């Protein structure tokens, strides 16, 4: 079975999501050792909001990013439709 052709916006949105996730991981590590840094907390919250926006848009267009109730799915069940985000 061949992989379906994905639009450029799939890869662009997935790349943007991965970039925001990287920033959130780094800010989380920083805040673990600097819990009173208000600027870092504000930056973390801004990126968390941005992540939610990007993820919501991605899921509307291409299907769920996470399972176990963390993402919605359309009918038919979308988890059997490759490629999954971690396969790209």
Image (cartoon, rainbow, N blue to C red):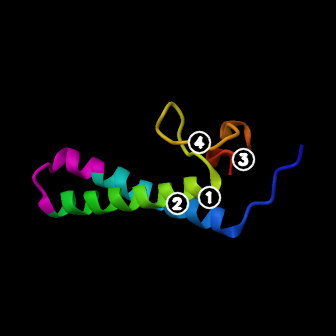
- SS at mark 3? loop
Which one is nearer the viewer's eye here, 54 or 78?
78
Q: CA distance from mark 1 to mark 2?
A: 6 Å
Q: Which residues are magenta?
A: 28-38
The residue positioned 67% from the left and 37% from the top of the image is 77
Residue at image mark 2: 57
Residue at image mark 4: 73
Q: CA distance from mark 2 to mark 4?
A: 13 Å
Residue at image mark 3: 83
- SS at mark 4? loop
The residue positioned 62% from the left and 45% from the top of the image is 86
Q: CA distance from mark 2 to mark 3?
A: 17 Å
Which one is nearer the viewer's eye here, 29 or 6?
6
- SS at mark 2? helix
* Residue 32, position as x, y percentages in the image: 21, 44
* Residue 72, position as x, y percentages in the image: 53, 42
Residue at image mark 1: 61
């Amino acid at each position: 079975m061949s992989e379906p052709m994905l639009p450029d916006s799939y890869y662009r949105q997935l790349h943007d999501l991965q970039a925001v996730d990287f920033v959130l991981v780094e800010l989380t590590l920083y805040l673990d050792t600097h819990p009173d840094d208000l600027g870092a907390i504000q930056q973390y919250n801004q990126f968390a909001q941005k992540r939610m926006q990007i993820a919501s848009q991605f899921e509307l267009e291409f299907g769920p990013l996470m399972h176990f109730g963390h993402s919605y799915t359309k009918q038919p069940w979308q988890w059997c439709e490759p490629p999954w985000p971690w396969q790209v």
